[in-house]
Image (tube, rainbow, N blue to C red):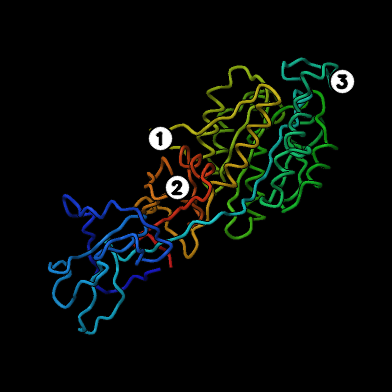
């Protein structure tokens, strides 16, 4: 980390000179230090994974009182300013991005229709007779806490908690059945889900339930550095407590409220849901902070048990793989877009490929960048920010 101070800074010739020196395109390993042997004499390895130089031996790029070192830094010539040489655009801070342990609250629809099969055959709570088209609720249970369920496989890497929600008759709405978030929580979640099956004719008060989980995250915050996430699985459009009136706008607002509190929300549709495509897309965008003009977030829809299990797996493994911790300090989210983030040496675009969470330490890789990270054998993510974006 290079601290900000009153010392002189110097511009990169690779960034400012047209055309840049040929060695600027040479890839190098910044983790090996600035003196990476890959870079030729007169160059050092910069945070972006490319050789860089601030000066030439015979030039005057450093100005009076400074000389150019053999690896392309400007060094004080002994006028009392003995600060370490620094790179362009204000002294920068380089972070190494490391995996985090996220806190995920599973918000599972417990309405009566979750007892139906994927063809929406109303059994009235009776067990299925056709095992080729299983009950939706049982399929959710298997996908999460079954032998090959994603919670079963990742319980040591995620603080998992669960909330079942419904508008049960003759009880306070929303009716919530919850367990707190913890590592190795599969057994507790299994008991919650298996012993609190849906009740026939129960409704789907989604906005109130999202707000309740958001409030719980505020009251019981996750461990430091653990990003909070809601994974919502539902098989219908939202209802208002006390009636079957649609509350799509309120649900979108609840997702926006969660994101405003630093909580990402992913939505998964269970079964074929009529007239719900736009609402689910709106929910996905709201829950992931997508702004007008930006690419849509993914709205997950599962119309059979196989795609349901795959969707849960993709959502949760994506959070585990693509939420990273900036090790060594924090960033002002309001000015984070001024930073440079690279994946395997390739620069990423702010807003499309990456964002920084409100906590200032969680870096989210998005879309194709997230896919690349998950498919890389030994991925390297580096982030560099000017000192004006750093919170010390």
- The residue pinned by badge 1 equals 294
- The residue pinned by badge 2 equals 355
Density class for disc 1 (Cα within 10 Å; few <14, some 14-19, many ≥20) is: few
Q: Residue at x 40, y 62 (%)?
A: 94
Q: Residue at x 36, y 64 (%)?
A: 36
Give the total number of marks visible in the rendering.
3
Q: CA distance from mark 3 to mark 2?
A: 47 Å
Query: Mark 2 vs mark 1: which is more N-terminal?
Result: 1
Mark seen at residue 126: 3
Residues at marks 3 and 2 touching, judged by CB atoms closer than 8 Å: no
Residue 107 at x, y percent in the picture = 68, 38
Query: Mark 1 vs mark 3: which is more N-terminal?
Result: 3
237 relative to 57 in the view: left or right: right
Label 3: state its secondary structure.
Answer: loop
Quadrant containing the C terminus is bottom left
Judge by depth and name the residue closer to the eye, 352 or 290.
352
Q: Nearer the viewer, mark 3 or mark 2?
A: 2
Residues at marks 2 and 1 touching, judged by CB atoms closer than 8 Å: no
Judge by depth and name the residue closer to the eye, 306 or 185.
306
Judge by depth and name the residue closer to the eye, 326 or 148.
148
Q: Is residue 82 above or below residue 99?
A: below
Residue 345 at x, y percent in the picture = 39, 50
369 relative to 172 in the view: left or right: left
Q: CA distance from mark 1 to mark 3?
A: 45 Å
Q: Is residue 350 above or below residue 84?
A: above
Density class for disc 2 (Cα within 10 Å; few <14, some 14-19, many ≥20) is: some
Quadrant containing the N terminus is bottom left
Mark seen at residue 73: none
275 relative to 205 in the view: left or right: left
Q: Quadrant of residue 271?
A: top right
């Amino acid at each position: 980390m290079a601290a900000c101070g009153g010392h002189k800074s110097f511009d990169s010739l690779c960034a400012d000179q047209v055309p840049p020196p040929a060695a600027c395109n040479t890839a190098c390993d910044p983790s090996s230090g600035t003196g990476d042997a890959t870079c030729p004499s007169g160059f050092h390895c910069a945070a972006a994974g490319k050789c860089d130089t601030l000066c030439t031996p015979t030039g005057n790029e450093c100005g009076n009182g400074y000389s150019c070192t053999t690896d392309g830094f400007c060094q004080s010539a002994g006028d009392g300013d003995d600060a370490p040489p620094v790179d362009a655009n204000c002294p920068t801070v380089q972070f190494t991005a490391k995996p985090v342990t996220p806190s995920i609250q599973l918000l599972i629809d417990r309405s009566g229709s979750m007892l139906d099969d994927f063809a929406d055959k109303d059994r009235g709570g009776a067990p299925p007779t056709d095992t080729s088209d299983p009950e939706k609720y049982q399929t959710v249970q298997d996908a999460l806490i079954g032998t090959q369920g994603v919670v079963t496989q990742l319980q040591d890497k995620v603080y998992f908690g669960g909330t079942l929600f419904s508008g049960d008759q003759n009880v306070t709405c929303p009716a919530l059945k919850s367990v707190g978030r913890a590592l190795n929580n599969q057994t507790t979640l299994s008991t919650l889900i298996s012993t609190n099956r849906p009740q026939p004719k129960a409704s789907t008060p989604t906005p109130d339930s999202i707000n309740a989980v958001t409030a719980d995250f505020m009251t019981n915050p996750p461990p430091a550095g653990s990003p909070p996430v809601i994974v919502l699985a539902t098989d219908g459009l939202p209802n208002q407590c006390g009636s079957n009136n649609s509350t799509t706008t309120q649900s979108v607002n609840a997702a926006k409220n969660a994101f405003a509190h630093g909580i990402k929300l992913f939505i998964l549709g269970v079964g074929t849901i009529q007239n719900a495509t736009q609402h689910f897309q709106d929910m996905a965008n709201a829950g992931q902070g997508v702004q007008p003009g930006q690419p849509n977030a993914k709205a997950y829809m599962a119309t059979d048990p196989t795609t349901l299990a795959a969707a849960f797996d993709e959502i949760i493994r994506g959070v585990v793989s693509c939420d990273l911790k900036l090790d060594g300090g924090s960033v002002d989210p309001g000015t984070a877009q001024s930073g440079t983030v690279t994946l395997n040496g390739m620069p990423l675009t702010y807003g499309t490929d990456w964002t920084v969470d409100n906590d200032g330490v969680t870096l989210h890789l998005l879309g194709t960048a997230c896919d690349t990270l998950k498919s890389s054998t030994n991925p390297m993510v580096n982030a560099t920010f000017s000192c004006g974006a750093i919170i010390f």
